[in-house]
Amino acid sequence: MNFLHKPKPLTLVLGGTGKTGRRVADRLKAVGETVRIGSRSAVPSFDWDNEASWDTAMKGVTAVYITYAPDLAFPGATDAIQAFVNKARKAGVRRLVLLSGRGEEEAQACERIVQTSGIDWTIVRASWFNQNFSEGAFIDMVLNGAITLPAGDTPEPFVDADDIADVVAAALTQEHHAGKVYEVTGPRLMTLADVAADLSDATGRKITYVNVPHDGFMAEIEASGAPTEVAWMLDYLFATVLDGRNASLTDGVARALGRPPKDFAAYARDVARTGVWERAA
């Protein structure tokens, strides 16, 4: 007698070693989900720049968390997302969750590709992560006691990567999130001067914010030997996205999870206890 068996759920987490991907993978594993990490170093490997790697990485996959590096606003991103979605549909993927950029027109074009894919989808829109100051490009500034960025006094609703991961994990495992767009923010609008003040309180040492000219900042980034994609992303963030367009709060975290988002001050206190911001003697 022949029996038809549903394939065992398998979730591909793209960027599975990154800020949100690592957290999403951990949450899925904690509830017994089977996870495949999508990264260049994984086996099988996944590389956005090598389309030939996508089919193997997607074999047997039922759901995908899509993060695109360096950013959905990067030239060529829409073509890559369209090609990936086409392959996902052919591979029988049943659910897509896309990490998108808040206030980025190019990212919204990628959202539309996912939304018209014929696959169940959820969009999670985010902007500045709290973790940029502890795991990303700005940790050295915190260690040196001066956040030197060309941000003026524009407020941003910094969001915690743990909140993003909780929303994504829920969307990947719970049916009622299908067809939803969750625009996620923290609970408070903050300037970088506010960020510096919270970091000072958490670390017990003075951390200042120094507004610097955009052109000078980019010259320093290029002189540092930063990868082209990183330099492009920072230029785009500070010259385009950080213009006040995202200076509003949303209820995305509460709608998805039924709880408020984490405040930056709580994030700073938690990270300070790990010793990440303690300078070597």
Image (cartoon, rainbow, N blue to C red):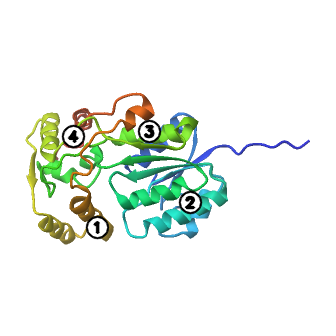
Residue at 56% across, 60% down: 85
Provide the secondary structure element on which disc 4 rests.
loop
Residue that carries the numbered disc 3 in the rendered image: 167
Q: Earlier in the sequence, mark 1 or mark 4?
A: 4
Q: Is residue 223 left or right of residue 104?
A: left
Provide the secondary structure element on which disc 2 rests.
helix
Residue that carries the numbered disc 1 in the rendered image: 232
Residue type at mark 3? Val
Height in image: 248 above or below 40? above
Q: Looking at the rendered structure, which numbered label has been put on residue 157?
A: none
Residue at 46% across, 59% down: 110
Tags 2 and 1 in contact by the CB under 8 Å rule?
no
Residue that carries the numbered disc 4 in the rendered image: 189
Q: Earlier in the sequence, mark 4 or mark 2?
A: 2
Q: Earlier in the sequence, mark 4 or mark 3?
A: 3
State the image coordinates of residue 188 (x, y, percent, origin top left): 23, 36
Q: Mark 1 or 4, which is nearer the eye?
A: 4
Residue type at mark 2? Val
Q: Is residue 35 left or right of residue 17?
A: right
